[in-house]
Image (cartoon, rainbow, N blue to C red):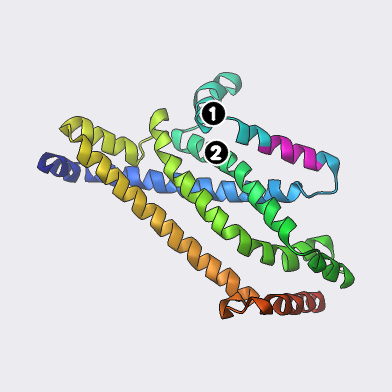
Amino acid sequence: MSDFFSTLLDELPQVGAGLWVTIQATVLGSLLALLLSFALGLAAGSRLLLVRGVSRTVVEFFRGTSLYIQLFWLYYAMPQLTGYELTPLLCGVVAFGLNYGAYGSEIVRGAVNSVPRAQYEAAVALNMTPFHRMRRVILPQAWVQMIPSFTNLLIQLLKCTPLLWLISAADFMTTVEHIRSLTGETLTAYLLLLAVYFVLAYALTLLMNVLERSAKRRLGLHTGARSLLKTRTADAVTTAGGAR
């Protein structure tokens, strides 16, 4: 164990760089996944058949194929078709974003559909445009319901970042594996990996919890009286209509 930690100190710059690659892949992949989640999830509720069809096709394709295969296809197969090669980090970001964005779109679609129909009718009665109805009335209520599911999804994305090791990305998993091969300390190396990924996942959970509390405060849910939700929502609709 002493050999492992002495080597770890010697390789600390590489370890830090690998951890930074893991964080970058998580953050950038999550941002792309969230963007695609809203784009595909809202498109699934479009009145246009073509838009709904494209959304459903994309979602089912990326949910129905393995993330492993998507990652390998982007890194190994796509350059042979296009002549353009993605860096390992960018390849991971795109694969994670597409895969988890497809799953996230169902979260968005379900949360938007769960908003009471009366909210839509009130917004229409105020002569709000579809864009303002969605932005001012529907999404603020749906967003609160999305956050817990998005938290689980983003943690799953974080836990998939060690797959970057398979395409030769210099992430945290790669650097720890290198140290393990130098020292032969398998138990210590994998305990370190468990601890670091747990800390990252817990930090992400705390961040999303703060976001959830903030979203609930905006709807008046921080008082603990759920009966106030309809009143606060009606006020929000009225205010939005007046602002318009």
Labelled pair 2, 1 in contact (Cβ < 8 Å) = yes
Q: Is residue 58 magenta?
A: yes
Question: Residue 186, percent across and down?
Answer: 22, 35
Where the C terminus falls, by quadrant? Answer: bottom right
Q: Which residue is drawn at 53% across and 27% down?
A: 69
Describe the element under mark 1 as helix, strand or loop.
helix
Where the N terminus falls, by quadrant? Answer: top left
Q: Does the magenta stretch include residue 70?
A: no
Left or right placement of residue 60 versus residue 184 in this view: right
Q: Residue at x 32, y 35 (%)?
A: 174
Mark 2 belongs to which amino acid? Val
Q: How far apart are marks 2 and 1 (CA)?
A: 8 Å
Label 2 environment density (alpha carbons within 10 Å; few <14, some 14–19, many ≥20): some
- Nearer the N terminus, badge 2 or badge 1? 1
Question: Residue 124, percent across and down?
Answer: 87, 67
Along the line of sight, the residue nearer the viewer: 83 or 45: 45
Q: Residue at x 58, y 80 (%)?
A: 223
In the rendered view, would you say 194 is above or below 140?
above
Residue labelled with disc 1: 74
Along the line of sight, the residue nearer the viewer: 164 or 13: 164
Question: Magenta residues, as a range?
Answer: 51-59
Q: Residue at x 59, y 71 (%)?
A: 216
Q: Is the magenta stretch mostly helix, strand or loop?
A: helix
Mark 1 belongs to which amino acid? Leu
- Residue 94, which numbered label? 2
